[in-house]
Image: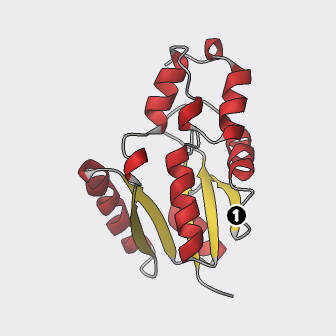
Amino acid sequence: MGKAALYPGTFDPFTLGHLDIVERASRLFDRVLIGVAEPRHKSPLLPQEVRIRLVRESVSHLPNVEVKGFCKLLVEFAREEGITVVIRGIRAVSDYEYEMKMAWMNKKLYPELETIFLLSSEKYAYLSSSFVKEIFSLGGDVSNFLPRPVADYLKRMGAETYEV
């Protein structure tokens, strides 16, 4: 079996920036596992099962990418999956500072785990799930920021069902 990497996140919702990171990681690794986390500190816009389904639909063109949900420490999930590489996307220096601390903590908990940072493509450097949720909650069109399955789902869902 070749080298595998884990790309974790809540993906609430999964954006074109996330998809870009996955597509690039899929060229670097034999297997990429997208771990869809269930957040404990915030209420997600979309239930975990829906996020998993939408991410799967969004990456269906990538044969070496799979998607699983998890609700435990990232290091425990990675250990269970036999993965020793975590991929994290970086948009700005502020992302790096946070991600660096998280990588060090994960390394303390799972010494074999390495974190690799992929810089966001310039065209997605501004994009975040938080911005998308805010625009969506105010009735704005978010379809230019999302893969087609996610955009279609949110369009059907309607902004009236979500409040910031």
Residue type indicated by callout 1: Leu
Q: Position of residue 158 (x, y in %)?
A: 67, 17
Return the residue nearer the eye: 107 or 154: 154
The image quarter containing residue 162 is top right
Q: Tell me the element at label 1.
A: loop
Residue positioned 58% across, 38% down in the render: 146
| Colour scheme shown | secondary structure
Q: Position of residue 131 (x, y in %)?
A: 44, 30
Residue of label 1: 62
Quadrant for the N terminus in the image? bottom right
State whether residue 122 appears in this view. yes
State whether residue 44 appears in this view. no
Left or right for 41, reference 48 = left
Return the residue nearer the eye: 82 or 120: 120
In the rendered image of this protein, does residue 121 appear above or below residue 116?
A: above
Q: Position of residue 53 (x, y in %)?
A: 75, 46
Return the residue nearer the eye: 44 or 1: 1
- Seen from this angle, which residue lies furthest top? 160
Which class describes the residues within 10 Å of circle 1: few (<14), some (14-19), or many (20+)? Answer: some
